[in-house]
Structures are given as C-alpha cells and as structure tokens.
Amino acid sequence: EFGDQIMLVTDGGQLIRCPIDGIRIAGRSTQGVTVFDTDGKSKVVSVSHISESDEDEDDADSDEPQSQE
C-alpha cells in the first residue's frame, strides 16, 4: 500500500527504514532485489512491515500533547 515502509535491523544494530513503493517488483526468474547492503560480516536479523495506518494510530496513542495547527 502506498505510504507503507519496511524496517530492517542487523545483528550489529544498524537499522534502515525505507518506503515499500521505492522497491521494484522482480519476476520469479530473477535473483531478487537488494534493499540493504551489509558490510559482509553483519546479517539482517529482523524485518518489519510498518503500515501508514499504524503510524497514525501511534500518534493518536501518544501521551505527548498534540500541537494544534
């Protein structure tokens, strides 16, 4: 869905968050799509999908006062 993102975390603590709509779609006969290059020693240990609606809910649940514009 437009506006959704993924977050990848390595075992070294490096984190990247990128929009899904920026990732191209590849066919079955390809070798995949590179989203995140590690230094060769690190490995991706976690991938999470973050939907735009989840972020809206988090903003509404926040204990911090919301600014009125």
Image (tube, grey):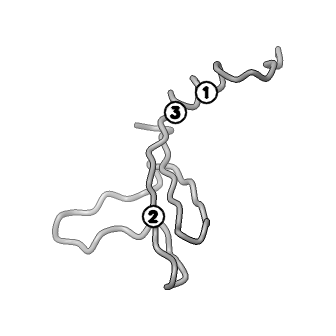
Residue at screen point 79% across, 23% down: 64
Pointer 1: what residue? 58
Q: Which residue is drawn at the image coordinates 52% and 33% (left, top)? A: 52
Mark pair 1, 2: CA separation: 24 Å
Residue situated in front as seen by the camera: 33 or 46: 46
1 or 2: tag closer to the N-terminus: 2
Secondary element type, mark 1:
helix
**Amino acid on which disc 1 is placed:** Asp
| Residue appearing at x 58%, y 31% in the figure | 55
Q: Position of residue 65 (x, y in %)?
A: 81, 18
Image quarter in which the C terminus is found: top right
- Closer to viewer: mark 1 or mark 2: 2
- Give neighbour class at mark 1: few <14, some 14-19, many 20+ (Cα, 10 Å): few
View extreme (front): residue: 11
Q: Residue at x 53, y 61 (%)?
A: 9
Q: Residue furthest bottom?
A: 40
Where's the N terminus, which quadrant?
Answer: top left
Q: Which residue is mark 2?
A: 45
- Is disc 2 placed on a helix, strand or loop? strand
Dot 2 crowding, Cα within 10 Å, few <14, some 14–19, many 20+: few
Mark closer to the chain start, 2 or 3: 2
Q: Nearer the viewer, residue 9 or 29?
A: 9
Q: Is residue 14 above or below residue 63?
A: below
Instruction: Residue 61: give x, y in percent of width and height.
Output: 64, 20
Relative horizontal placement of residue 8, taking residue 34 as reference (left or right): right
Which residue is identified by label 3?
A: 52
